[in-house]
Amino acid sequence: MTTDQLSATFAALADPTRRAILARLSDGEAGVNELAEPFAVSLQAVSKHLKVLERAGLISRTRTAQWRPCKLEAAPLGEVSDWVERYRRFWEGGFDRMEQHLAELQKGDRND
Amino acid sequence: MTTDQLSATFAALADPTRRAILARLSDGEAGVNELAEPFAVSLQAVSKHLKVLERAGLISRTRTAQWRPCKLEAAPLGEVSDWVERYRRFWEGGFDRMEQHLAELQKGDRND
């Protein structure tokens, strides 16, 4: 079973610690120790979160000799933005009349 | 254990069938049978997906006598948009020089 990119991105974002890690990385690259500092979780737990983020393409890790900094990779977030944008008219309101109109059109051929 | 709203929203969106259901509902309200039609899944599976979407506040269901249409509730999508917006400068590029500058600043006090 393969997971599509957008599903992998959303799944990776469904955790407050992982989102906080991305927020930290938006200030610049950071190593695992530095990323773990603000959280009441083990280095091991942070490493797991980093693996999820890396698999979803949301971070990359440079392989240098002694320091392996994590870097934000925002392309998947651009896809999230594109996806959610199409719903903007719904949360910005002013859509009630249109919605009502569609509902009335549908009453005609409704059969469940 | 409680899940924060944004995590619940992202988890609900981490499934292509659930996203397709939201896309269908953006055209207007629909009943379970109608929502199940395009998918090669059972009514029961679709009902489960609807429960996840409902718990995340992404849909609501009217309790009428014979027909319980599902309706898109887009407020949580507005929160997703607000969250992802702050990363726009990263996926829109032109950020490499700034990033490089920050990386250089960090080299000074790096200790992990």
Image (cartoon, coloured by chain):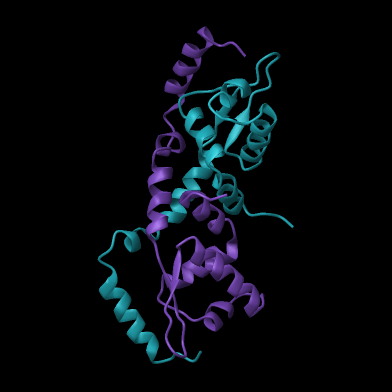
Chain colours: A cyan, B purple
Q: Residue furthest right?
A: A1
Q: Residue at x 58, y 56 (%)?
A: B14
* Count of all numbered marks drawn on residues in the image: 0
x then y, percent, for residue B92: 42, 37
x then y, percent, for residue A53: 61, 38
Q: Residue at x 35, y 82 (%)?
A: A103
Quadrant where the C terminus of chain B lies? top right
x then y, percent, for residue A76: 53, 44
Q: Residue furthest front?
A: B1
Which one is in front, A11 or B7? B7
* Residue A81 located left or right of residue A65: left
* Residue A14 located left or right of residue B87: right
Q: Is residue A101 above or below residue A108?
A: above
Q: Residue at x 64, y 23 (%)?
A: A62
Q: Quadrant of residue A88?
A: bottom left
Which one is in front, B72 or A1? B72
Q: Is residue A66 above or below residue B79?
A: above
Q: Is residue A76 above or below residue A44?
A: below
